[in-house]
Structure formats: structure tokens, C-alpha cells
Amino acid sequence: MENKKHLLVIRLSAMGDVAMTAIVIKAFVAQNKNAKITVLSRAFLKPIFDDIPNVDFYVADTNGRHKGVFGIYKLYRELKKLQIDAVADLHNVMRSKLLTLFFTGTKSATLNKGRAEKKALTSLKNKIFKPLKSTHERYADVFRALGYELDLSKTAFSKPKSLNDSLKSIIGNTTKKLVGIAPFAQHNSKAYPLDLMEQIIKKLSEKENNTILLFGGGAKEVDALSTIANRYKNTICIAGKIKLKEELLLISNLDCMLSMDSGNGHFSALYGVPTVTLWGGTHPYAGFTPFNQPKENSFIPDLKKYPHIPYTVYGNKMLEGYEDAMRTIEPEKVCNRINKIISA
């Protein structure tokens, strides 16, 4: 262990992006036995990395002792004691750039977000509509810039761990097909209309061999999902009942996940779970498709009716007149895709 090169990997947020880095890091440590990694991120995201060998986790308290310029310098002094050989900045924001700067003399590489390409993809005029490099490959490029070989096509997925008694008591019969559904997203432009999502839940729940598990976070989502779960048989609201570590354990055992362009889709992809995604103002071409998923698993609105899609990279804005774009994604087609996956 003493002879291993020690890499600091910086990715402070957001949850889905951190999950995407985990896939890349998993491939990296498997292909580079002479290296070990310390991931720097928010405390609640630690469970994402718990099962990856040769990976330690360091908490960035950016709202507390690591806040501001002096806080980042204090963080640097703490990390320096770990004898870091190289810095991989997978975030490329002011905090991560400042921290990397403090590591003067230490080899470093920074994420290229491809801002110009993404701006062209989301432009309302003279749009250049073509698939861009995946975010996973952009992360991998940072490690390659540090001199390491990394082939994401060789990523191996772990077999799901056995569910603990606590989870078994929540979901009941574990021999059924487990279908996870995460119907919400951080921004409205990426959230499928709830009435249409209910049609999907209703249809899937009618099969006695299915158990539908509803994922979400926050009081409003918990209330909404609990109400929906009470309406349909074979449907259970997971939201608000378990912590992230148990949630990841449960997700790893799913037969399929249905998600928006959001973090839950990246969680399931991390474990090789077939993941179906529904897209609104964003689009798979921007590079945020869950890892190793076929294009048939991505459903997008009618682009003839809504030609400006994608008009946003992260979903943080809504284009006037595009509020109902996701209504052109037919629930029946989504159900058919999920049924095909779980019956394979």
C-alpha cells in the first residue's frame, strides 16, 4: 500500500454527478492497481463509495470549517498530510480550482465540461444537434491526463448484496420483480407529469409478480408518493423510510429503474441495473445518460412539436410553451419497455 500513488479526487456535488464519478473511479481502481484514491465530497454522499476498494473518503465541510478562501486553505492543509501525489479535479468550480491551486507542485488535471459544445447544443438559433462526449468519458479524461490508462468499456459491476432484514420487512416478497420508480427531479423541466406517471405505476402494479418501489426525498415528495402508493396494490413508498446507504443497497437489487434525468438513474446504473430515463428540456446528447444504457432506454419528447429541445443542459430553466413537452412521452410505451426488460 505504501508504494501506491495517492490521488485526490474532487467532486463536491451534485448527487447524480457524484454517482457518475463513482462509476469511473470503480473502473480506475480496477485497472490501476498501483494507485489509491481519496474522494473529497459532501458527508452524506460517502455511502456511494463505501464498496469500492482502495478508495477513502474525506468530508468537505464547505458550509462550516471549510467555508470561504480561508476554509479551503484549511482544507488544503488537512489534505496535505495525506501525502497526495496527484489531484483530479472532476468538478471545475471556484472551490475546486482554488484547492487545486494550493497544491502547487503537485501534478493535477481538471475536468473539461465542454461548455461551448453544450451551449451550441442548447442554442435556440443555429443549434448544433449532435451527441457530445459523455460525462463519464470527460471524467475519465482527467485521469488519462494524469498519465493513467482507463477503459470504461471494461467496467465490471458487483453482484447485488443480500437485502438486510430491515429492507425485507419494508418490501415483503423478495422473489417478485422489483421495479424502482423515481418520478421527481430537481427542476420542473425534467419532471414527468405526475398524472401520467400514475398511469405507468397503475399498469405495472397490476402484475402480481411485480413490486413497485417509489423513490424520492423531501417532505412534499414523501407525501405525494405515499398517497400514490396507497392507491395501488403491489406498490410501496420507499421515500423517507431509509437512509442513502440502505437505499443504494435496495437499488442494487432492482430489476429495473425508471428515473428522470436525475440522480436515481445514476445510482441504479452504478450497479448495472437496467435504467429507463424520461427526458424533458434536457437531452441524452448532452452527455448525462446513465452509464452503459442502450438508447432504447431513453424516452424524449416529440422533437417535431418541440424542436428547441434541448434548451437547457442541467434543466434549471423552462422554455415558454414547452411546459407540456413531456406529455408527448406515452406511458404505454414506457411500460412496454420496462416489461420487456424485466421479462428478459
Image: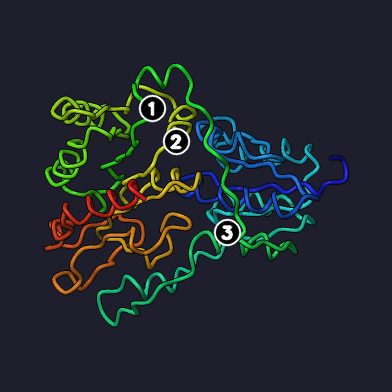
User: Which callout, 3 or 1, points at the residue further toward the start of the chain?
Assistant: 3
Where does label 2 land, which residue?
253
**Residue at 78% of width from left, 55% of height from top?**
106
Q: Nearer the viewer, mark 3 or mark 1?
A: 1
Q: How is the image coloured?
A: rainbow
User: Which callout, 3 or 2, points at the residue further toward the start of the chain?
Assistant: 3
Relative to 231, 120 lies left or right: right
User: Which callout, 2 or 1, points at the residue further toward the start of the chain?
Assistant: 1
Q: Amino acid at mark 2?
A: Asn
| Residue 312 coordinates in the image, percent (x, y) | 31, 62
| Viewer-side residue, 344 vs 293 | 344
Relative to 319, 68 lies left or right: right
Q: CA distance from mark 3 to mark 1?
A: 36 Å
Please tell me whether residue 133 is drawn above or below residue 199 in the rendered image: below
Circle 3 SS class: helix
Where does label 3 land, which residue?
139
Circle 2 SS class: loop
| Residue 54 coordinates in the image, percent (x, y) | 72, 40
| Residue 48 coordinates in the image, percent (x, y) | 54, 37
| Viewer-side residue, 65 vs 134 | 134
Where does label 1 land, which residue?
174
Relative to 33, 198 lies left or right: left
